Every structure is written in C-alpha cells, then in structure tokens.
Image (tube, rainbow, N blue to C red):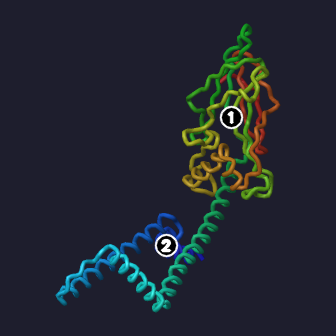
C-alpha cells in the first residue's frame, strides 16, 4: 500500500505541472488572452505568408498588384476559415488531444485528492499525539510579589516562565505593575472535545496569557509574555527525550499549527477545535511583599495557583 502511494506521488510529480499549465491556459483570463494572442499571431503569420506568396505569383506573371489593407483583411479571414475547416476535417485528432488534456487534469486532480486525504489523516494522527503529549499536569510559571504601594493602591510583581525543553525557568523575568489588591490570571482554553483530534475523552489545553485585578477589568488586562518568537507557548516546549510517538521536527511543526489556533479562529474550526474560551481561575493573589506563587496547568484545562516559599 505504501509503495503504491509513493508511486502515485512520483507520477503526480510529473503530471501536476502539466495540469497546472493546462488549467492556467484554459481557465484563467490571462491564459485565455495568451491563447487568443497566439492564435492571432499564427493567423498573422499565415496572412503575411499568403500575401508574400501571391505577390510572387503576380510578379512571375509580370503583373504588378498592390495589396491594400482591405486585401490583407480578406486574406486574414480566408486563412481563419481554412484553419476552421482543417479542425473540422481533423476532428478525431482534436477530440483525442482534448480527451488527453482532460485525462491529465482529471488524473492529477484525483491524485491530489488522495494525497490530501492521506496527509490530512497523518496530520490528525500527529495532532492527537501532540495533544496527548500536552494533556497532563505541569508547572507553568512562578510569581513573586515585589511591592504593594498602599498610597497608589497598586501591586508590582515579577513572573518567570518554565521551559520544559531546558528543564528550568527562562532567565527573562516579566515585571508587571497593576492597580488593585486582588490579582487574577486569565487563561485561554482550547477545547478539543468532539473535534477531529478528540481521543475519546475531554481534552483541554490551557495557556495563561493575561492578568487583571479588582481595579483593572479583563478588557484592559496586561498580556503575559508566554510565547516564543514563533508564537508557541514556552510551556509546550519539549526536547526529543520528552516527546513520545513523534519525532521532534514533526512535534514542532504541529505545535505551531495548534499555536496558530489562538489567533486564527478559521484555522481552529478547520482543525475541529470546538471552542477557544478565556477562563480565569478562582485563586486570588493577595499582594504581600516577598510572597511566591506557582501556577500549574491541569489536564482538564484549568489553572491552579499555589502559594509556595520564595524562589
């Protein structure tokens, strides 16, 4: 079966450019214009040749004839009629050529459909494995309260994000100052329940992405720097030894697709994601200088904020 699929891909590697060229010529405005121009050039060539031929005949007969533009137009349509008659006389050849072109387009399109189906099935399988790798409880970040200004009623804290690929917290700390005494961490939950990559049980992936407070509403929340330069959350980083069922390059590629769902609702819908919702945990960070909190993601897609000792 695998050998047949590879053979099909090799055949289509040859047929696809031909199919694309045929479709370009006969189904696009540019292609049709090119065909018309080629036909006109061919007819102009025939007309010029016929004018030259008749001039030579008249010259051989020692008759001087001047061909006007009107004469040339008449010869042009005469050549057009002859070309049409030639097509009629060779209708079998024309039909064979047309059937050959249609056959190439149809066969290549069929191969494309099969290839798309196979690739889509592989993608679904890969996404299942990626979600399975991520559907567990794990640590996301630590928050340390730096200061609370009673006069301004604002809290300053720093947050560090955990990178599982390196097995440690990232060196860069994000420092945030926000009004209020009660701090909330807002998470984005990707719900794979009833989706194309659903595995028989409810699977949610949660990503903490914003903080707000009792003084700052959600709509004015402060974004957390939880994404790397490619848009993938740091908490989803894994090294090759931590990934099962996939090679690291495939994992990274599929992970970027899942990360894309955060900002591309259409892509999420096509992948079968049931919903992407923002949900804040019940835990509240009470601002006390030096206090440290750990943020955990649960397999169900929820966040847990635990009070711990200092870093």
Q: Quadrant of residue 107?
A: bottom right
Residue 306 in view (yes/no): yes
Assess disc 1: are there few (<14), some (14-19) or many (≥20) residues with their C-alpha within 10 Å of its C-alpha. some
Q: Quadrant of the N terminus?
A: bottom right
In-image side of 158 versus 76 (left or right)? right
Q: Secondary structure at mark 2?
A: helix
The span from disc 2 to disc 1 (Cα, nearest Å) is 49 Å
Please give the name of the residue rendered at 71% of the width and 26% of the height, measured from the top-left corner. Answer: 220
Q: Nearer the viewer, residue 91 or 130?
A: 91
Q: Nearer the viewer, residue 82 or 269?
A: 82
- The residue beneath circle 1 is 209
Please give the name of the residue rendered at 23% of the width and 82% of the height, measured from the top-left corner. Answer: 55
Q: Quadrant of residue 290?
A: top right
Residue 204 in view (yes/no): no
Q: x, y (%) of residue 299?
A: 76, 45
Please tell me whether residue 144 is drawn above or below residue 80 in the rendered image. above
Please give the name of the residue rendered at 61% of the width and 39% of the height, measured from the top-left corner. Answer: 234
In-image side of 113 versus 289 (left or right)? left
Residue 271: numbered disc? none
Please tell me whether residue 129 is drawn above or below residue 35 in the rendered image. above
Assess disc 2: are there few (<14), some (14-19) or many (≥20) residues with their C-alpha within 10 Å of its C-alpha. some
- The residue beneath circle 2 is 22
Please tell me whether residue 114 is drawn above or below residue 299 in the rendered image. below
Q: Secondary structure at mark 1?
A: strand
Which circle, 2 or 1, is nearer the viewer? 2
Q: Quadrant of the C terminus?
A: top right
Q: x, y (%) of residue 16?
A: 50, 71
Q: x, y (%) of residue 168?
A: 60, 35
Dot placed on the residue nearer the N-terminal end, 2 or 1 = 2
């Amino acid at each position: 079966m695998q050998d047949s699929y590879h053979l099909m891909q090799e055949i289509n590697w040859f047929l696809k450019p031909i199919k694309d060229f045929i479709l370009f010529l006969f189904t696009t405005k540019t292609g049709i214009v090119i065909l018309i121009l080629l036909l006109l050039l061919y007819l102009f060539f025939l007309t010029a040749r016929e004018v030259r031929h008749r001039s030579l005949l008249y010259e051989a007969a020692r008759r001087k004839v001047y061909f006007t533009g009107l004469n040339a137009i008449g010869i042009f349509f005469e050549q057009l009629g002859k070309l049409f008659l030639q097509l009629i006389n060779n209708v079998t050849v024309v039909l064979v050529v047309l059937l050959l072109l249609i056959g190439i387009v149809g066969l290549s399109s069929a191969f494309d459909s099969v290839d798309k189906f196979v690739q889509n099935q592989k993608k679904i399988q890969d996404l299942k494995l990626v979600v399975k790798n991520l559907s567990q409880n794990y640590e996301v970040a630590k928050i340390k309260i730096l200061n609370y200004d009673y006069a301004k009623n604002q809290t300053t804290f720093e947050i560090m994000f955990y990178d599982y690929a390196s097995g440690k917290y990232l060196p860069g700390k994000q420092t945030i100052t926000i009004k209020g005494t009660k701090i909330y961490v807002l998470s984005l939950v990707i719900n794979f329940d009833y989706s194309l990559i659903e595995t028989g049980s409810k699977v949610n992936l949660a990503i903490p992405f914003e903080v707000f407070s009792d003084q700052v509403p959600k709509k004015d929340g402060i974004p957390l720097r939880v994404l790397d330069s490619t848009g993938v959350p740091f908490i989803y980083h894994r090294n090759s030894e931590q990934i099962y069922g996939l090679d690291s390059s495939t994992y990274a590629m599929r992970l970027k697709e899942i990360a894309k769902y955060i900002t591309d609702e259409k892509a999420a819908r096509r992948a079968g994601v049931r919903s992407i919702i923002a949900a804040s945990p019940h835990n509240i960070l009470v601002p006390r200088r030096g206090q440290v909190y750990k943020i955990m993601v649960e397999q169900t897609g929820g966040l847990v904020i635990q009070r711990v000792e200092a870093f």
